[in-house]
């Protein structure tokens, strides 16, 4: 079909009507209780956090010393650990609450779990480990295997502590070291610490009245109960569900991936929806071994990472090596802007072009629901009425199709959520749906306090608590170093590249930086490294010259991107990245590191 024919067929967008519809749908979902609507999983609900995958092994508490302790055994800890080992730091101890490495990918073993960013750039250290991803978008078991591979290859298992939750981190000024205390009775010391606890690791439950009354079976998607469902994380049929009535609450990125598998297995599946996700084409494909051998020349993954970031968050590159949903999204916006004559490329017109491209994309996604879902009323309810980046965009080729199965019912709550849970089922609009099992695809804590999510409030120099130091917002250099917390490194995207479409890229760069800094400190015989207050203040000032937060617009439909539609307070203004964008940040960081003096850090 030619572009002209396409244009002729499509009705012109009525932007005013769309804006009104978006606002109307948003208003339905706004709740006064914001983040308070969710239940913290403690007390009688604590069993929802039990590890269904690995039994806990008893061990004696530790009171020894290591050069580097890292809190978290997910991607952040693994890539930092790997870089430290490469830099010749022999004793690196990762402390992890799960029973193995993997973090997100340890816990999220729900059927269909898969990365949404192309695995060639998403999976860390592919070149170093020599692993060829099997698919464009790898499934969870392969990603978990990659985590284990990194752990094995870099000897990170030797000192790792699993099923161990850090309860306290305290700077011991007299000895220039950290004291690490855990829920297993450990009180060991470390010359340096790293923190990679991740933003989305504490599951939450919806605060639906009656949730504790339900007498059937229930679990959260991040603790999938294969004993109950049958099947396995590789997508094996969950045969034990054949005679079961199953409810899944939530239709976010997790549910979108799990629903097709549940639809295939369950006697009856009810999908309880509050806000539909935007579900675009996935187009997964195997990665051909010959093709891979051709491109995997030395330095390939770094080239791919840089190309992805340049296309996604750097103004475009001549070539798009990765070609996934994210680079497609950016390309469309750029093309729209390029259609403007150069003299008309003002910030205002560029914003308008961006909005146009978004309206068009979302119309396309809504039409996709219409084209795939046979029942018109169901198709209509699956349409997302908001801008694409208001919520996590999803990509899937069998989610919408699942609603054509006769055993699947979409229970749309018209933005209100499930009304009540009874002993035997769920109530929406006064109608009770009797079920045997409830699966909570209700997501993870995001808007809650850092210390609640981390489980500790670290104490730096002179008794300074992190919660005090960051009371008015996060304060760091590069998102990694914070004044008052010597020898401590944060491994996460904010105040650095802030590249959300490929979080691992932020982590691998931070890991590389930390490896070099610790090596430098050890070589210099420095016992402490700390960012100066001046360097930190200057960095914060620079961050504030940027365009502000890219995600989380208050006029979006409520969700964790925008603090459930409530004012996040002034501290959120600091949850930003490098003003010139992610690609520019990585170039800046590379130059900063290469100079070798690590300007802004004081080595003592
Ligand atoms: P989300 O927080 O994205 O989704 C939670 C879902 O639960 C939403 O649909 C929410 O509705 C719904 N919900 C909450 N309360 C109620 C209620 N009372 N009644 C009915 N529904 C309710 O969690 P996910 O686990 O889906 O995803 C978390 C994040 O993890 C993603 O955003 C993504 O960043 C990441 N992820 C990444 C994947 C990947 O890369 N492949 C795959 C899966 C997840 P509402 O929208 O109205 O709030």
Image: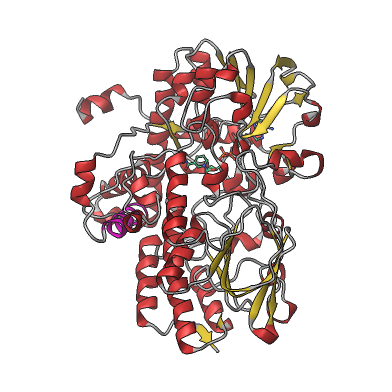
Question: Quadrant holding ligand 1?
Answer: top right
Q: In the figure, residue 209 lies in which quadrant?
A: top right
Residue at 38% across / 82% down in the picture? 596
Q: Where is residue 307 in the image (x, y as percent from the top left)?
A: 29, 55
Q: Position of residue 9 (x, y in %)?
A: 29, 22
Residue at 50% across / 61% down in the picture? 156
- Which quadrant, please, contains the C terminus? bottom right
Q: Is the magenta stretch mostly helix, strand or loop?
A: helix
**Front-most of residues 556 and 502:** 502
Does the magenta run of residues contain 88?
A: no
**Is any atom of residue 393 visible in this view?**
yes
Q: Where is residue 314 in the image (x, y as percent from the top left)?
A: 34, 58
Which portion, as a residue range, is magenta? Answer: 300-312
**Is any atom of residue 471 visible in this view?**
no
Q: Position of residue 46 (x, y in %)?
A: 76, 42
Does the magenta run of residues contain 303?
A: yes
**Front-most of residues 284 and 335:** 284
Residue at 33% across / 48% down in the picture? 120
Vertically, is 19 above or below 494?
Answer: above
Residue at 52% across / 10% down in the picture? 406
**Front-most of residues 355 and 506:** 506
Vertically, is 536 above or below 316?
Answer: below
Q: Residue furthest top?
A: 406
């Amino acid at each position: 079909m030619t572009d002209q024919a396409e244009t002729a067929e499509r009705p012109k967008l009525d932007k005013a009507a769309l804006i009104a519809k978006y606002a109307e749908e948003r208003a339905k979902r706004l709740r006064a209780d914001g983040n308070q609507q969710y239940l913290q999983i403690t007390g009688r609900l604590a069993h929802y956090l039990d590890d269904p995958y690995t039994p806990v092994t008893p061990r004696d508490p530790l009171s020894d010393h290591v050069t580097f302790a890292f809190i978290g055994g997910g991607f952040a800890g693994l890539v930092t650990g790997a870089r430290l080992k490469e830099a010749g730091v022999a004793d690196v101890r990762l402390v992890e609450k799960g029973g193995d490495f993997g973090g997100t990918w340890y816990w999220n073993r729900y059927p269909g779990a898969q990365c949404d960013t192309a695995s060639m750039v998403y999976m860390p250290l592919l070149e170093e480990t020599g692993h060829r991803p099997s698919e464009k978008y790898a499934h969870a078991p392969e990603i978990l295997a990659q985590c284990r591979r990194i752990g094995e290859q870099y000897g990170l298992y030797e000192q790792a502590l699993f099923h161990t939750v850090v309860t306290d981190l305290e700077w011991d000024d007299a000895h220039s070291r950290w004291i690490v205390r855990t829920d297993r009775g450990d009180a060991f010391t470390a010359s340096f610490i790293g923190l990679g606890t991740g933003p989305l690791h504490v599951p939450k439950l919806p605060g639906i009245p009656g949730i504790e009354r339900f007498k059937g079976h229930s679990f959260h998607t991040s603790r999938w109960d294969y004993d109950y469902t049958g099947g396995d994380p590789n997508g094996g049929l969950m045969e034990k569900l054949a005679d079961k009535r199953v409810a899944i609450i939530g239709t976010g990125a997790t549910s979108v991936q799990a629903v097709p598998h549940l639809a295939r297995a369950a006697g009856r599946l009810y999908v309880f929806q509050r806000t539909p996700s935007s579900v675009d084409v996935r187009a997964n494909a195997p990665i051909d071994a010959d093709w891979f051998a051709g491109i995997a020349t030395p330095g390939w993954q770094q080239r791919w990472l840089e190309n992805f970031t340049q296309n996604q968050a750097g103004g475009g590159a001549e070539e798009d090596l990765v070609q996934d949903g994210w680079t497609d999204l950016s390309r469309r916006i750029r093309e729209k802007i390029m259609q403007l004559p150069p003299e008309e490329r003002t910030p205002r017109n560029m914003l308008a072009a961006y909005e146009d491209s978004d309206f068009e994309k979302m119309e396309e996604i809504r039409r996709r629901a219409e084209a795939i879902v046979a029942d018109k009323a169901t198709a209509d309810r699956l349409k997302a009425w908001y801008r694409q980046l208001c919520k996590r965009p999803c990509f899937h080729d069998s989610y919408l199709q699942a609603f054509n199965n006769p055993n699947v019912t979409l229970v749309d709550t018209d933005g209100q959520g499930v009304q009540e849970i009874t002993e035997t089922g769920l109530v929406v609009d006064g109608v009770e749906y009797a079920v045997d099992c409830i699966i909570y695809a209700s997501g993870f804590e995001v808007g809650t306090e850092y210390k609640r999510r981390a489980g500790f409030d670290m104490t730096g120099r002179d008794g300074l608590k992190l919660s005090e130091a960051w009371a008015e917002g996060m304060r760091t250099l590069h998102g990694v170093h914070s004044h008052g917390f010597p020898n401590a490194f944060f491994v996460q995207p904010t105040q650095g590249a802030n590249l959300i479409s490929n979080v691992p890229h932020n982590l691998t760069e931070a890991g590389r930086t930390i490896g070099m800094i610790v090596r430098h400190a050890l070589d210099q015989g420095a016992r402490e490294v700390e960012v100066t207050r001046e360097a930190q203040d200057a960095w914060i000032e620079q961050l504030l010259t940027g365009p502000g937060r890219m995600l989380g617009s208050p006029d979006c439909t409520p969700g964790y991107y925008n603090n459930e539609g409530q004012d996040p307070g002034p501290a959120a203004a600091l949850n930003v990245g490098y003003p010139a964008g992610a690609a520019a940040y990585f170039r800046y960081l590379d130059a900063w590191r290469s100079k070798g003096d690590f300007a802004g850090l004081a080595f003592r």
